[in-house]
Amino acid sequence: MIKLTYFDTSILRILIDNPIAWVNFKHWSIKELGLTPKPIGSVYLFFEYLGFEKMRFEIPDSLHKPNLGHLKFPKERQEAQKARERKLPAFKEEIIKLHEALQDHIANKIEFNKNIITDLKNARFVEKNKSRMAWNETFTAIRAFRDNSNIFLQQDSLEDSLFDEYNSLLENNFTEFVKYASSLLAWDELCSIIPGGISQDDVREILFGIWRCHYEEHSHTLTLGKPAIGLSHYYKLDDKPKNYLMKNYEDMVDSEMYTLLILGHKTDDEIKAVNVITLETPDVATARMKIVSGNIVNMEDVLNIYLPKFTGKVYCVDKNLNLVKVLEPQIPIRL
């Protein structure tokens, strides 16, 4: 059975640029993931791989820090319930409008930066070729890796399988590329908003509802790792390693890969488990895994639903892609 694999951005760059790391990866991955693990492409991964930073979208404060004070619920329980019932439709409409505004803004920024994206693609191609010229000289000097050209072909095959779809859209149907990319990037930003005048906890129910619609109607699993959705206190973390939280203008890929780790990925009309390969230390990976799985259970409670879990494994590796530790997902248990 072919196993689905999600490569963290830093892992992917090492795999494609470093033949020695590729050999190290193959040494253990064939046993763990099979001879031909299927990599999962992602628009988040595509942008991060090229080095197109989310800061370029220049999200204005009016969208990133919207004032939602007029929707704030009273603290008194009875009054709060009545206010919630009265304000919830307007609240939902406000969040949906914000989502649409974010998508329009990001779409305009992608169109404005089309040449920069193309330049980054070309620069990445040049960077990769320079790296391979250096490796060829090394191979010749040590008379090793006689099949190094085959390794390069395998590396190119991995890159193509991940990004051919996005490259094709970028070159041949830019309008569709903008539409698809902006919808996902807008969701990522929506989960990172810092609303004024209202608790982030009050935003989560609407965001959960939007997530559920995408999951049920479009068979698409949106990410569940960012602050506005994810209540990190829902899952108690006794040890909080440095840099375990997923940041607003970073960590799009991390948010997605841990979501897919828990819920799986739909391919060929079947949901399959996803394995994650990351440079994160085991303690950071464990903390992020708990945060995202906690968010998922939290959403189930809020919406009174059950989401089937198709859990994979996390493979923590070092910078040379030697296997350090294998982690099993941890799902919160309701008390």
Image: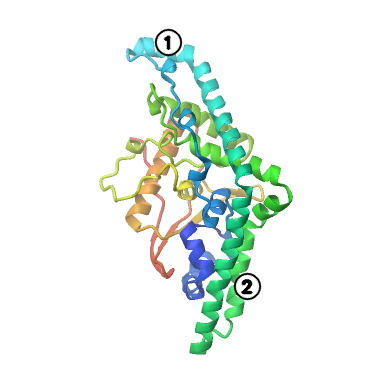
Please tell me how crowded label 2 is: few (under 14), some (14-19), or many (20+) other residues with Cα within 10 Å. few
Q: Quadrant of residue 177?
A: top right
| Residue 19 vs residue 224, the one in the foreground | 19
Q: Kindly identify the amino acid type of the residue bearing the numbered disc 1.
A: Lys
**Residue 153: mark in rendering:** 2
Indicate left or right for 219 with 282 as reference: right
Q: Quadrant of the C terminus?
A: top left
Residue 205 lies, in percent from the top left, at 46, 27
| Residue 180 vs residue 107, the one in the foreground | 107
Q: Secondary structure at mark 2?
A: helix
Identify the residue shown where x is 53% and y is 83%: 137
Residue 279 lies, in percent from the top left, at 41, 60
Residue 71 lies, in percent from the top left, at 44, 17
Looking at this rendering, what residue extends furthest in the left direction? 238
Count of labels shown? 2
Q: Kindly identify the amino acid type of the residue bearing the numbered disc 2.
A: Leu
Identify the residue shown where x is 52% and y is 78%: 134
User: How far separated are the C-alphas under marks 1 and 2?
Assistant: 63 Å
Residue 128 lies, in percent from the top left, at 56, 68
Q: Secondary structure at mark 1?
A: helix
Identify the residue shown where x is 46% and y is 73%: 24
| Residue 21 vs residue 181, the one in the foreground | 181
Please tell me how crowded label 1 is: few (under 14), some (14-19), or many (20+) other residues with Cα within 10 Å. few
Q: Earlier in the sequence, mark 1 or mark 2?
A: 1
Identify the residue shown where x is 49% and y is 26%: 206
Residue 324 drawn above or below residue 56: below
**Residue 289 in view here:** yes
Circle 1 residue? 82
